[in-house]
Amino acid sequence: MPLIRLQKVIAEAGLASRRKAEELMVAGRVTVNGKVVDRLGSRVDPERDKVAVDGRVIGEEPKVVVILNKPRGYLSTASDDRGRPTVVDLVQGVGRRVFPVGRLDLDSEGLIIMTNDGPLAHGLAHPSREVPKTYAALVHGHPGRQALKTLADGVELDDGKTAPARVRLLGAHGGNAILELTIHEGRNREVRRMCEAVGHEVLDLKRTRVGPLSLGPLRPGEFRHLTEAEVESLRQAVGLIPSPVDVPDKPPRGGRSGPGPARQPARPPRKTR
C-alpha cells in the first residue's frame, strides 16, 4: 500500500479531523512504532506501522462497515463548520464513530460506505485501485451515439481527459434519458461534468454500486451493517488481507437515527424543470 500522510491516517480512523490531527502531532501526542512523530509531512503505511494517539493504537478497535443510502441535502463529510447536516447524522446508531468513504455531492443520493477501517477506506477511494462506481443519471435530452461513445472513450475536462467508462442507455423519462455510467476515478462531480461536456446536463444522480456492493432496497436515509462476506469482498477488491469486522448477530435490513429524513416511498427520477 502507498504511504499515507500521518494526519490523514488519524482522521480516517475517526479520532479527529485532519486539522486537529496536525495539532495532536505538533503537541507530541502521536507515536509511530513507539516513537513520537511531530513532523507534519510524515507518511506511514497503515497496514505495517503502529500508529497511536495518546497511547491508543489505531486499528485495535473492532472494525465497522455500514452502507448508507445518502439522501439529497446531506454533506458527505464527518462534520461541517456551518452546521449543515452530514451523513454522520444518519448513522448515530452504529455503535462506533465511522466516517464516509469518498463523497457524493449535496444534490446527489445513493450508496455511500461508512467505516472506521482506514486502510479499507483508503483502498476504496484511491484511483490506483480502480474500484468501479456505478451511477444512474437522468440527463437532459437524449444523447446520440457519438455522445455515448465520447462518454465511454473519455471526455476532455478542465483537469484532463477522463478514463474510459462503461455507459448504457437505460431508457427515457419524459423528454429526457436515463443513463447508467460506471467509472473508477472519483474526480470531483465527475459524472455531472462528463455529461455536461457532451451537452447533456444531469438533472438527477444516484450512485447504485461500489465495487461488488450494490445499494439494494435501502431507502434514502436508511443504513445497514455489511455482512462479513460483503466486507471481505470489498477488502479483496482493494487487495487487502482479511481483517476482523464487528458485525451484529442479526444485521438489520435498514436503520435510521438522529435528525434523518422520514422514510420515503420509492419514486422515479425527478421530472425535468
Image: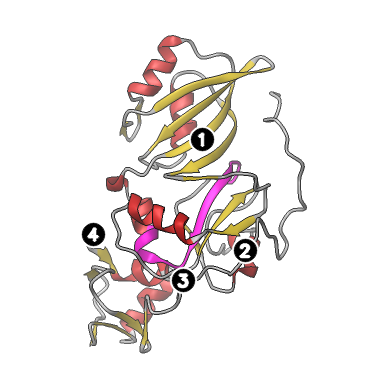
CB atoms of marks 1 and 4 within 8 Å: no
Residue 81 in the figure: left or right of residue 15 = right
Task: Give the labeled residue for mark 4.
Answer: 1
Work out whether mark 2 precedes mark 1 in sequence or the reverse, and give the earlier one. Answer: 2
Which residue is disc 3 drawn over? 14
Q: Position of residue 53 (x, y in %)?
A: 37, 83
Give the distance between the C-alpha atoms of the residues marked 3 and 4, in whole angstroms: 20 Å
Categorize mark 3 by other alpha carbons within 10 Å: few (<14), some (14-19), many (20+): many
In the drawing, what numbered circle is on residue 100? none
Q: Label 1 sits on what residue type?
A: Tyr
Estimate how packed mark 4 is, as few (under 14), some (14 to 19) or many (20 or more) residues with alpha carbons within 10 Å: some
Q: Which residue is mark 1?
A: 135
Q: Amino acid at mark 4?
A: Met
Real-space Cα separation, disc 3 to disc 2, in angstroms: 14 Å
Query: In this rendering, would 167 be left or right of 218?
Result: left
Q: Which residues are magenta?
A: 106-121
Helix, strand or loop status at disc 2: loop
Distance of label 2 from label 4 (alpha carbons): 29 Å
**Residue hosting label 2:** 91
**Number of the front mark, 3 or 2:** 2
* Residue 165 x, y percent position in the rendering: 37, 29
Residue occupying the point 64% across, 69% down = 93
First-in-chain label (1 vs 3): 3
**Depth check, front residue: 88 or 232:** 232
On screen, residue 15 above or below 36:
above
- Can residue 83 be seen? no
Q: Residue at x 24, y 76 (%)?
A: 39
Label 2 neighbour load within 10 Å: few <14, some 14-19, many 20+: many
